Amino acid sequence: MHRLKKIFATDSYIVPLVAIVMGFLVGAIVMLIGGYDPVAAYSALFKRVFGSPYDFGEAIREMTPLMFTGLAVAFAFRSGMFNIGADGQVLIGMTAATLVGIQLAGLPSFLLVPLAVIAAGLAGGLWAGIAGYLKAKRGINEVITTIMLNWIALYLSNYIVRNFLLLKGQNRSEDIPASLSMTFLNGVFDNARVHWGTAIAICAAIFFYVYLWKTKQGYEMRAVGLNPNAAEYAGMNVGRNVVKAMFISGAFAGLAGAGEVLGVFHYQSVFAASPGYGFNGIAVALLGLTHPLGVILAAILYGMLTYGAAGMSFGADVPPELIRIVIGSIIFFIAAQGIVRWVLKPFYLKRKKEKVS
């Protein structure tokens, strides 16, 4: 039995892969029940993503905000908190980047772009820091405060755009001269909206890993997340680590906002409802097992499925909503790892017998 447990621990990376396969199988079964051809649907999905340089570039663009918001949720989770306010932090980051980009438009690009990006990260971090402060000083659950801050962020960002940045006669801000677009790749991706935010997201994932697992401050954050009482007994400042963790988490989400307004749209809209970046980030963080590398891979998968869903609709006449069933099934199997391990158990037992013999 001990040997079998050791095999399970060694091969635990297989579980997410099997969960993904099982999610696709569940989606195929649902399609068959609905009278659709799953082979044609999945073929159309992947053709939509990889069928042309433009579509592949747009799929990368779809993945980028998911990387940031997934990292935001995962970082908070590793520190013992559940940040479901990434959506509001994205909006605040957008607004800060838009404000800096428009108000300081006279600056040269090599100054304006970094300032706008830094402003977005700081604004998102400070917005999340409010929830962290209330948790540390007043003991208020961060789930409640981040939900409320999402709505405040939506109306605050709309107010700022309408009253200070609005393009006359339009329901959006003026054009932002600062740009994160990778113009030198226009020829490669047929003018797809690929931008530097993708590279920044990968750097953020590296920072996530190095900071949490290779520094004293990261060790304290993880200790606070695992057991705040034990961490406090060991002399760690729990409140400070809570605020710091939420600030870093919010900064990741704020950078997602910078990428969207500086790299994709080049203006900020007045939103009728929450854009949903942060809520998708929760799914990405869970799918990536709250590890930075896992989050990047999960964002790639989630972005491919989301962007490719339109291909299912046009290429195989399958409702694009069915892709949500696939994503939901994958997340379910990731969360219910016992089911996946039960499916894998006969294979592990067979391998154990082969090794013994």
Image (cartoon, grey):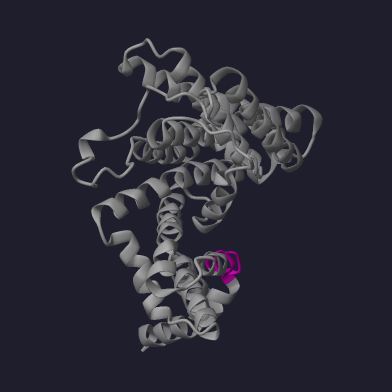
Q: Residue furthest left?
A: 187
Pick the front one: 135 or 184? 184
Pick the front one: 291 or 349? 291
* Residue 296, x across and y down, in percent: 42, 50
Q: Residue furthest front?
A: 169
Magenta span contains residue 206: no
Q: Is residue 164 above or below residue 228?
A: above
* Residue 292, x across and y down, in percent: 45, 47
Q: Which residues are magenta?
A: 330-337
Q: Residue furthest top?
A: 106
Pick the front one: 317 or 70? 317
Q: Is residue 281 left or right of residue 64?
A: right
Residue under the point 33% across and 35% down: 196
Location of the C terminus by quadrant is bottom left
Location of the N terminus by quadrant is bottom right
* Residue 183, x across and y down, in percent: 25, 34
Residue 6 seen from this side: yes
